[in-house]
Image (cartoon, coloured by chain):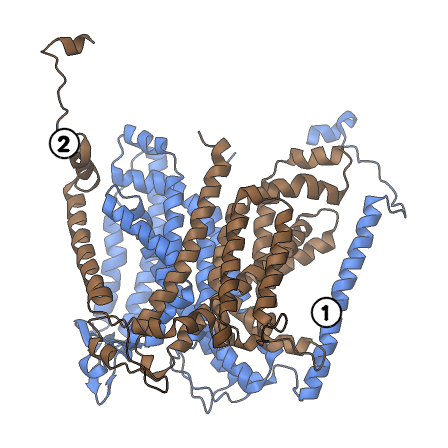
Amino acid sequence: MSESAADPRYAPVAPPKKAVKLSWSDPVFRGIVWQVVIIGAVIGIVWYLASNTASNLASRHIATGFDFLSRVAGIPIGEHPIAYEPSVNSFGRALWIGVLNTLQVSVIGIILATLLGTMIGIARLSRNWLLARLAMTYVEVIRDIPLLLHLFFWYGIVQTLPAPRMALHPMPGVFLSNRGIRFAELVWEPAHTGALLALLVGIVLMVFVSQRATKMQEGTGLRPAIWPAGLGALVALPLAVWAIMGAPFEWETPVLRGFNFQGGGTFSPEFGALLIGLVIYTAGYIAEIVRSGIQAVPHGQVEAAGALGLRPALVLRKIVLPQALRVIIPPMTSQFLNLTKNSSLAVAIGFQDFVSIANTTLNQTGQAIEVIALIMLVYLSISLSISLFMNWYNKRIALVER
Amino acid sequence: MSATASPDTARERPPALTVGPLAWLRANLFNSWLSTAVTLALGYLLIRWVIGFVDWGLLNAVWSVPTSAQGVANTSACQAAKGVGACWAIINDKWRFILFGRYTFDDQWRPAICIALFIGLYVVSAMRRFWRWELGLIWLVTLSIIFVLMWGGVFGMEYVPQDQWGGLPITFILSTFGLAAAFPLAVLVALGRRSTQLPAVRVLCVVYVELVRGVPLISFLFMASTLFPLFMPVGFNPDKLLRAQIAVILFAAAYLAEIVRGGLQALPKGQYEAADSLGLSYWHKMGFIILPQALRLVIPPLVNTFIGFFKDTSLVLIIGIYDLLSAGKIALGEPAWQPYGTEIYLVVGAIYFVCCYTMSRYSRGLETEFNRSVRR
């Protein structure tokens, strides 16, 4: 570039600038006219709707603005990750609990659906005919039935569970009844927080150690064993911190008292049905994505890796998966977004996610515009964060081309 | 030829385990100890499940129950079979409500004809022989007939207000009209998003598409049921179904626009340049050269989107419109029938499955047909 700039013969020649003719045959002029017309029409429609809205609001005596957020909500909320009292706390806090509930079900759902979907996707490629056929049937049936029907079906099943008095007891500390899932919970002590922090420090240490090992491998061809360091940083360090701080270990198990269980952690039947429905439905889509991603890796790659003498597990980890991931990640992102948006169907079975609480708020305050704007804002920010994260990850694993 | 002559080299059967059904079994079900274990475990579970289902759904099922003079079903037979047998009597009793909703009982032949017309319309549209401009005319005529049949009020048919419609026709109406109206809008938005000459229009289209795709359909439906009346002049209040229909159209258009844009991008640049060099105007270029090719490319994903929206129309339940799924749910509201949700959901699910599975098989068939030139 610099040479061509020095040599006048290669200097870039700007195309001759044409003056905009005020004639219909000039595309630039035409473009400007069209844009003015279209934008004008859009502004006109918006203005018309806005003026209608203003007169409607005036005739119904609804004040606009977000003041209602600080008013006392009075909405009873069954599941709240943060403290909440209907007669004390505001609409703002109620809505925030809705956001937390939505995030909770989405995050758990995304993790479980990815696990289940990957397993089914791999099962579809199994050499075992029966397994492959069953996986295929799962995918076909699950994807062709509306999610809402899945949710109703599972909610119906969850409700037919026995009463707490005769709760199912599949493993120690877990009770299944029509009041939801009760499970034993660890009594949280500062020592546990300490152990978690130590684990975090250990992970950071391990990242450094493995980077150094990679550098040494690139330099000398030999990779030093990093598992002793890993054992120390990830297992021994947190354990030691926990032991030094008194090694507390106490479970709080649910106890049947009267008509329901007391103590321990709990998932409501609504949460359970929503989670099961979302996971089973989305896993069907993820399975197809995983299958097509793995099939997109040319078979020659596997054969070449085998010819180099790599073991099958290593072939999968080092050759097939990294290439398959490039195909898998973009559609997977949109499935994660779908799951998050679909979690709003909670309103149909009575789990109080964000849309459900926002809808109640709307009915109680009548602030339709503000509430709908909030719904859009929250979902747009969640969608945007997920796609930003997935785009970053996609860029990280993308093929580096010349 | 000499091989048959010599007795030494008489034709020998291959070893039993290399060809035939035994070999297939060995290769596909029992080729390693792990595979054998998986086959046995899955086979055991499958057989047990099938036996259990046949017991529950066929052998121990209750097919009909007596109804009292007031029309209240006596479900004691179902209650006795609860847990061991299905209560198909609920379907026997409620199938007309599930299919047609609250439509006037004596006039339910009208929605039945509508369902048949819809199915006929889909079948005709699926046949490539009919992919001509006349197809648009067929659509227009059929959809008008469907509306006349549903509304009534002419030709001696009784008028049936919209809030009495329900069941399968609503599902068909919402998805078919939604897609039919969203499609032209989607093409315009896709063209706008691709346009280089009109940056302001491009920005407008991008904002519209991304805004709609970022929020759930439910929030759109809420908007239709609460905001729409606010937007309209005082006193003008369109009915619920129309509002939901507009929401579905605006929502579907954003998704379809992205698919159409994919088709526009997949077309080689030479096609655009060739059209330009012939001196065609923008609309001639798009209408005669670009869109016919681009839309053909995206028919399979369009069908898949149609399947998605066919399923998603069930969400109108949340704003109180009685489509197929809502009708099933309302049928459950009757106290006598309340515990038999599983049966209803299985039947409604089967209807959705048949519709969607047919469409997805069709879309896959088209895809293979279109890729014939690419495939080796």
The residue that mark 2 highlights is B17
Residue A164, quarter of the rendered image: bottom left
> Quick one: A279 or A402, which is closer to the camera?
A279
Who is closer to the viewer here, B368 or A6?
B368
Please state the chain letter of the residue tagged with numbered disc 1 in the rendered image.
Answer: A
Residue at disc 1, secondary structure: helix
Report if residue B109 is visible in the image: yes
Residue under pointer 1: A46
Residues tagged by mark 1 and mark 2 found on one chain of the structure: no
Label 2 residue SS = loop
CB within 8 Å, label 1 to label 2: no
Observer-nearest residue: B304 or A294?
B304
Q: Which chain is brown?
A: B
Q: Position of residue B233 (x, y in %)?
A: 72, 78
Chain shaded blue = A
User: Which quadrant of the rendered structure holds the N terminus of chain A?
Assistant: top right
Amino acid at dot 1 = Val
Q: Residues within 10 Å of mark 1 (few under 14, many from 20)?
A: few
Query: Which residue is most to the right?
Result: A22
- In the image, residue A121 sits, relative to residue A348, either above or below, namely above
Q: Percent position (x, y) of residue B272? A: 68, 37
Amino acid bearing label 2: Leu
Q: Position of residue A210 (x, y in %)?
A: 33, 47
- Mark 2 is surrounded, within 10 Å at the Cα level, by few (under 14), some (14 to 19) or many (20 or more) other residues, namely few
Residue sticking out furthest to the left:
B8
Residue B333 in picture, x, y percent from top left = 38, 80
